[in-house]
């Protein structure tokens, strides 16, 4: 059986690796001939809007899915006419635009930072006045890893607001921005959830995420001092989204914890970096679970695997020495096979251990 995947990066690669033992083969489409899923799966190279390539991608595939949320809507529409596409592309429409995302969160009773949209410089001045300072101005679309956003300090004046507008609308960005009130969060968490074709919803333990320069650096699972009440709140958020979107597959929601309550920042309608720890840390990984969902197979167990604690460290910009890393007990290395570049996610390492302190102590040695 073949899974077709739009995108051929590390997420598609890890989906392919998870599919192999289940007897599932993977075929990816990516514009880059260097796409790293190509090392372990069939790779078609070309544009997402090339009907001949989409035909080849879908040909004989049991289901089409995607590894990133900025797939052109026209591509998924074409594929839906020729194959089964899961999750339903309506989730892409939400995940591609911060306004749609936050509006849906609010509709479902999920708290967010205050926000206001702006398409012109004057509207941005107005939006900043509405949400107050400090705040963060973001592009509504195509922002990731802290790109496409500018922070405005408390008391930022009109010149600072105009400069943010100029920065964010330069270089071809669409003139569609969103200003968000700055959340003084206690910590960042994420909830990873999955919904099967039969509507069954499962979630993994909440994860605590730490960022460096806007990029995820470390995820700790389960999140330290995780109160059951917080997990229940996150589970309710995830279930509300999955059910509203009639979603099939894995979805992640990034959260801020503030004074014991959760606010949602954004959702990713796909497997997610903050879920990479599940490969060794959970009974069923997010990648296997996504495949189980989209192929209509029974869902797997989202409990912690035997050792009980996991810490995932992203390997960014340069790879640590392989031999040194593999000498650490309980460490699992995932080298994505990418050429090094500053700020690029080249791999990750997950440490599993029998205590939180031990997992964190070993994780601290991963990057040397
Ligand atoms: P994002 O691209 O929305 O995931 O933002 C990247 C990172 O910026 C988040 O993980 C937070 O650390 C921080 N951030 C984003 N939005 C806010 C906000 N409204 N208040 C405070 N920090 C934020």
Image (cartoon, grey):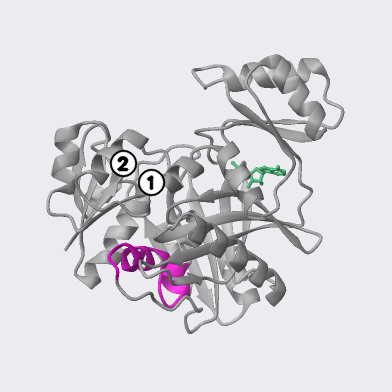
Who's the residue at 46% across and 54% down the image?
A: 320
**Residue 366, can we see it?**
no
Who's the residue at 58% across and 25% down the image?
A: 176
Where residue 149 sits in the image (x, y, percent)?
Answer: 63, 32
Label 1 beta carbon within 8 A of ligand 1: no
Relative to residue 245, is residue 166 drawn left or right? right
Q: How many marks?
A: 2
**Is the stretch drawn in magenta largely helix, strand or loop?**
helix
As displayed, is residue 199 above or below residue 319? below
Where residue 198 sits in the image (x, y, percent)?
Answer: 37, 70
For label 1, the residue is 89
As displayed, is residue 224 above or below residue 36? below
Who's the residue at 87% across and 28% down the image?
A: 155
Relative depth, front residue between 108 and 345: 108
Please identify the quarter of the rendering in which residue 76 is found: top left
Is residue 211 found inside the magenta-colored segment of the image?
A: no
Answer with mark 1 or mark 2, whichever residue precedes in sequence: 2
Residue range of the region highlighted in magenta in the rendering? 278-296
Q: Quadrant of ligand 1?
A: top right
Please identify the quarter of the rendering in which residue 103 is found: top right
Relative depth, front residue between 354 and 138: 138
Please identify the quarter of the rendering in which residue 261 is found: bottom right
As displayed, is residue 289 above or below residue 112? below
Dot 1 and dot 2 residues touching (CB under 8 Å)? yes
Where residue 207 sits in the image (x, y, percent)?
Answer: 59, 65
**Residue 161, can we see it?**
yes
For label 2, the residue is 76
């Amino acid at each position: 059986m073949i899974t077709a995947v739009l995108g051929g990066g590390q997420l598609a690669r890890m989906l392919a690796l998870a599919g192999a033992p289940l007897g599932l083969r993977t075929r990816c489409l990516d514009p880059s001939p260097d796409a790293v899923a190509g090392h372990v799966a069939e790779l078609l190279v070309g544009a997402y809007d090339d009907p001949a390539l989409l035909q080849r991608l879908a040909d004989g595939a049991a289901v089409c899915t995607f590894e990133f949320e900025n797939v052109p809507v026209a591509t998924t529409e074409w594929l839906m006419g020729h194959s089964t596409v899961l999750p339903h592309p309506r989730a892409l429409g939400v995940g591609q635009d911060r306004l749609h995302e936050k509006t849906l969160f609010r509709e479902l009773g999920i708290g967010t930072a205050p926000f206001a949209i702006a398409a012109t410089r004057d509207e941005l001045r107005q939006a900043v006045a509405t949400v107050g300072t400090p705040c963060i101005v973001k592009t509504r679309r195509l922002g990731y890893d802290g790109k496409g956003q500018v922070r405005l300090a408390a008391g930022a004046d009109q010149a600072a607001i105009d400069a943010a507008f100029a920065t964010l609308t330069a270089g071809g960005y669409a003139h569609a921005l969103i200003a968000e009130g700055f959340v003084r969060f206690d910590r960042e968490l994420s909830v990873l959830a999955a919904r099967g074709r039969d509507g069954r919803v499962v979630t993994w333990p909440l994860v605590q995420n730490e960022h460096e320069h806007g990029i995820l650096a470390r995820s700790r699972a389960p999140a330290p001092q995780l109160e059951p009440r917080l997990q229940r709140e996150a589970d309710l958020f995830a279930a509300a989204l999955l059910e509203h979107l009639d979603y099939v597959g894995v979805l992640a929601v990034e959260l801020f914890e503030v004074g014991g309550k959760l606010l949602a920042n954004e959702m990713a309608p796909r497997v997610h970096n903050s879920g990479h720890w599940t490969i060794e840390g959970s009974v069923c990984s997010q990648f296997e679970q996504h495949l189980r969902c989209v192929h209509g197979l029974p869902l797997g167990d989202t409990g912690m695997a035997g050792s009980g604690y996991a810490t995932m460290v992203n390997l960014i910009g340069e790879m640590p020495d392989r031999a040194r890393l593999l000498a650490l007990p309980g460490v699992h290395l995932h080298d994505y096979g990418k050429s090094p570049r500053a700020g690029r996610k080249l791999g990750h390492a997950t440490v599993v251990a029998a205590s939180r302190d031990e997992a964190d102590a070993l994780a601290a040695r991963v990057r040397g």
